[in-house]
Structure formats: structure tokens, C-alpha cells
Image (cartoon, helix red, strand yellow):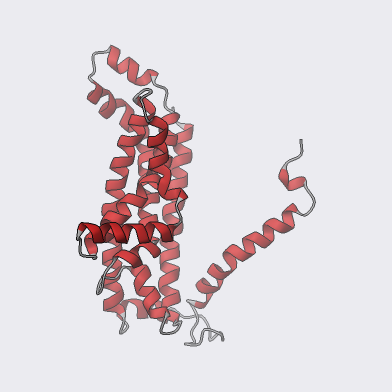
Amino acid sequence: MKGLRHYPGFLGLTLICLLVLYAPLLVVTVYSFNGSASITSWGGFSLQWYADVFTGPEAPRFAQAAWNSLTIATMAATAATLIATAAAVAMLRGGRFRGRQATFALINLPLMVPEIVTAVATLIFFTLLGLTTGYLTILLAHITFCIPFAYLPIAARLQGIDAAYEQAARDLYASRWQAFRLILLPLMAPGVVSGFLLAFIISLDDFIITNFVKGAGMETLPTAIFGSVKQGIKPNIMAISTLMLAVSVLCVSLSYILTQKGRRSP
């Protein structure tokens, strides 16, 4: 049976798709080093716009927005990873129970629902609860939609761990908690860290849901960038976007490496 790459036109179609996906990112990255303030003409290589991000007139605003994004992403990823780990252990080591398929569908529901629908529903839910939109509502929303992203690599890693390891520990008089803490959790560690990194970058980069539930005066880095872009695209925005892209690529790469490492280990 032929592989897909052997079909006529497959290579060309693949290259076109890659060009459409990544050409805009390449343009933003290249022009973030432009020595000219114009976004249409090249003025030579320069790091001035990266310096402007940290020392320019908008630096305090972006610094606060970045701090909000980092703290929210860290807490949301931590909470989502804890919940996802517990859910993965219950789903894959808890045996069969009533509503198992419904629970699995519920965990993965945020992946299937359009993000704009989730944003509107979340805002309505917080309004019904009487919560004032701001830092807390962003954190709660991020924890919710980060859970399935953390769950997937953790569950994938757990599926690759033979239950015989835990059974051997129980045969040697270890309690369930000891078997989990001393045997299962260390084996799950690559998947857990991978899930945390994936949830972290999803939270850090989110715009749509955050924009709905952030409230007045509260900004994260994506919403601060959007606010600046509405006044016109400036080179410092390209520099910030490139930095965020670099962080995203780093986190996703680490997550992939850890997932692959987990698959190769027992």
C-alpha cells in the first residue's frame, strides 16, 4: 500500500498548506528585527523594538499584562494538571463504572465546543453567579478549558504503563496511596509535565475567552496586544508577538519531547 507522500500532488498541497500556515509567522518574526518604524519597508537589522518592549512608553502596560498572563497561566495549568491527573487515574485505573463514557465526553467537551460559544456561556454563567469579571473569572475559565489539554498527554502516558507495576507494589503490602506515590506517579511524570506545559501555553496564548471574562481594566498579554493593534500595527507589537511565539514553540517542543520520552520508557 502506498504512503500518502507517493500520491500525485500530495507534496505540492502540503507545501501550500505549510506556506499559508507559517508564512505570516515568518513575516512577523522578520519584521520584528526591522530597523525602520514602517511595517512595509526594510530598514536594516535592529533590536530596537525588543528594547522598546522593555523600556518604551508602553512597557509598564505590557509588563503588567505579561505578569497577569504568567501568573494566571501558572495557576491554571497547575490546577488543570492536578484535576486531569486525578481524572486520568480514575478513568484508566478505576475500573468500569456507570457513566464512564459520559465522563470522558465531559472531560473533552471544551475541545469540541467552539471557543466563542464557550466564552459566551462562561460569561453568562459568571454573571448568574454574581461574580465580578476580572482576575478570578479569567483564572476559573482558564482552569476549565485547560483540563482536556492536560488530560490528553497524561492519559496517553498512563495507558502505556503496565498495571503489573502497581499490582507488584500492592503484593508487597504497599497501600493504594503508596503504590500511586512511589510507583505510578514517577512513571507518569513525563506525561504530567507534558500536560502542564501544554495547559500553560494554551492559557498563556488564549484571547477569545479571556476577552469576554476579563472585565474593565484587566489585561493579559494577548488582550493588551489586541488593544494596541486596534490603534495601528507597530513594530514593538511584532517584537512581543515573536517573543510569545518563541515561548509557545519552546513549551510545545518540551511537551513533545517529554511525551516521546514517556513512550520509550516502561
Report the quarter where the N terminus lies: top right
At horizontal 44% and vertical 30% (from top left) the residue drawn is 159
Residue nearest the observer in this picture, 54 or 111: 111
At horizontal 23% and vertical 63% (from top left) the residue drawn is 135
Query: In this view of the protein, can residue 71 be seen by the observer?
Result: no
Count of marks, rendered view: 0
Point out residue 237 in the picture as x, y percentages from the top left corner.
Answer: 42, 77
Point out residue 197 in the picture as x, y percentages from the top left corner.
Answer: 37, 50
Point out residue 216 in the picture as x, y percentages from the top left corner.
Answer: 25, 73
Q: Is residue 76 above or below residue 86?
A: below
Residue nearest the observer in this picture, 169 or 131: 131
Q: Is residue 214 above or below residue 83?
A: below
The residue most toward the front is 128
Point out residue 212 in the picture as x, y percentages from the top left corner.
Answer: 34, 66
Answer left or right for 174 relative to 193.
left
At horizontal 43% and vertical 78% (from top left) the residue drawn is 47
Residue nearest the observer in this picture, 80 or 102: 102
Q: Residue 139 is drawn in which quadrant?
A: bottom left
Residue nearest the observer in this picture, 136 or 73: 136
Query: In this view of the protein, can residue 181 be seen by the observer?
Result: yes
Q: Residue 107 is drawn in which quadrant?
A: top left
Answer left or right for 139 relative to 259.
left
The residue most toward the right is 8
The residue most toward the top is 171
Q: Is residue 147 above or below residue 70?
A: above
Q: Residue 225 is drawn in which quadrant?
A: bottom left
Report the quarter where the C terminus lies: top left
